[in-house]
Amino acid sequence: MEFKLEAHRIVSISLGKIYSARGQRGGLKLHKNLLVSLVLRSARQVYLSEPGCPPEPPPAAAGHPEEEPPPHTAAWAAEEPPPPPPQDEAGRDCQGPRPRRCCCGENRGGCAGAPPPPHCPRKRSAGERGQAGSPVKKPRREEEEPPPMPPPPSPPGEQEDMETGNVASLISIFGSSFSGLLSKEPKGRRRPPLDGGEAAASTAPAEAAAEPGQICCDEPVLRTLNPWSTAIVAF
Amino acid sequence: MFGGWGGGGVLTLCCSSSLKSAFFLFLPPADIISTVEFNHTGELLATGDKGGRVVIFQREPESKNEPYNQGEYNVYSTFQSHEPEFDYLKSLEIEEKINKIKWLPQQNAAHSLLSTNDKTIKLWKITERDKRPEGYNLKDEEGKLKDLSTVTSLQVPVLKPMDLMVEVTPRRIFANGHTYHVNSISVNSDCETYMSADDLRINLWHLAITDRSFNIVDIKPANMEDLTEVITASEFHPHHCNLFVYSSSKGSLRLCDMRASALCDKHSKLYEEPEDPSNRSFFSEIISSVSDVKFSHSGRYMLTRDYLTVKVWDLNMETKPVETYQVHDYLRSKLCSLYENDCIFDKFECAWNGSDSVIMTGAYNNFFRMFDRNTKRDVTLEASRESSKPRAILKPRRVCVGGKRRKDDISVDSLDFTKKILHTAWHPTENIIAIAATNNLYIFQDKVNSEMH
């Protein structure tokens, strides 16, 4: 269990580093970011392999009554199908458990085939734990606690919805290997997530004020997506 | 030969230069020293800093009048090597920080060195002028044309001595060779070519040709998503102009032979030590990344530095290093905090002494370590202003990890991780070392044994 918490913490620190790397003078440091991504992968693997991790849901995800996967979410979760418009994505983020769950299922299928699938399963598990009930909310809160500034107060339910939305978007970002941050999506998609992120920010100011250091941040990660991928593509 | 390292040891290092830190003391963080390098005779010592400046020190010739002042290093020249630039295509600023300086072997009265930042390598020529012609017929002392009517006789201009002036000029600029950040340069023993390495590629340049270079190593994967390792350092063999080595972030070394093929993607030898499974942690990969590689002067061995150890490799043995020295193993249990504060990414350099019998590397708290390969003894010393008054003798330090603690020991938890010694250099033939501690430069000399044994 201890290892799981440690792994969780390391994941959040790593993501914070990747985020802050984009603003560094002199451009992206390839070596450092590669090492950070390797640590991220190790931590995720430990997190998954620990016995405390709940079993993976079946792809259908039909077990939980409240998580019937809506068809549009399936489309959003998968990488190959054409990208949905940004507004829909932002809306789906806030829909609560359903998109994330389904995303897990979808991405799992997608991930299994992809060579190293590092990040997706970890995130899935983090989200699932949030689902299971109040005792499992603890890990997520712990995730939030490490950053220096606590998240702004907001109704717990709404926050959890934001969280699961964040997790879902993170899953899609880390969908495949090291450059999961580099989306396989067509170029056109890279701009929409940014706008989608900002749209979400305008609709949920409490959420938008969440610090970049926090792991489950929607906007900062989405904002990261664009410059990061630009940097890597430029390389 | 270096003898005992204890209190009365043969090696008694003392601070040789009163100038040691004065030059760097009052300056802002831009003047953090980023590289230190002696030239081939040890007469000159170059330092580069984060602000793109290069400062060259020259050793004063020994004088019988002041025997204690023999061999002090004083500032010889200062110049701005690199300026910050902006890459408009990628919207990225290019830092002016000098990553590496390498001296060229001296071939005439002038000295030359290569300095590089993340993208551009420059060849600088350093010349002295200590005479100036006087007695021109057509112009006066200030260079203004004379009124011809005042010229009544002809004279031959003569060279008169003047105050020494050191002139530094950029002779070549090797630009646009690298997409990624240049981490090392190395001059070939043929004195005609040199190589520059970035994260994914190594280029071979001719010193006289700036508009093209040959790519000799390319480890960029076709799909960047498959990237698993980067090049961290590289160096030419000191004697064989066809051999060079490069280290990777996975802890391996590759020796390449340029005679084998034009593109040296296939190594001739791969030096790799299997990981110790009992030491596995989240950070195993980071701490195994090699931050520096140096051939021994003999060319027989290579020295590598990773986060916690220095290792000596025999060129003839690829399976494991012949010697491993723990630099600061007490940090192994603190890797998570060091990851958090980014210290785990610090790139320490390493150095051989002139006879390849002692190796040196830096650590935290302004400590640096020396390992005698023959006696297997090691010492920890500190570069600090308090302990480094001129002619003061350095006292060995000790880090205690719990258990019995002696007076003057430092506990692991009170180490200052902002004071790191990343860059060190050893005089090519004598027991003189240059230690860069953030924005201070310390020069220490072995008082008793100035000459190498």
Image (tube, coloured by chain):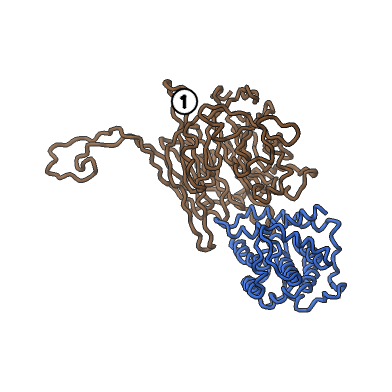
| Residue B218 pos. (x, y %) | 62, 53
Q: Which residue is mark 1?
A: B70
Number of numbered discs overlaid on the protein picture: 1
Quadrant in which the N terminus of chain B is drawn: top right
When the figure is inspected, residue B8 is found, relative to residue B422, above or below; the finding is above
Q: Quadrant of residue B308?
A: top right
Residue farthest to the top? B64
Q: Position of residue A110 (x, y in %)?
A: 77, 68
Q: Is residue A189 left or right of residue B111?
A: right
Vertical comparison of B398 with B32: above or below: above
Q: Amino acid at mark 1?
A: Gln
Chain B image colour = brown
Tell me the residue at 74%/43% (across/down). B333
Q: Nearer the viewer, residue B79 or B181?
A: B79
Foreground of the two, B23 or B425: B23
Q: For the residue carrying disc 1, how many other residues have a C-alpha within 10 Å: few (<14), some (14-19), or many (20+)?
A: some
Which chain is rendered blue in the image? A
Residue at 41% x, 37% y: name it. Answer: B110
Rendered-image quadrant of the C terminus of chain B = top right
> Dot 1 lies on which element?
loop
The single residue placed furthest to the right in the displayed view is A63
Q: Is residue B376 left or right of residue B234?
A: right
Q: Is residue A188 visible?
A: no
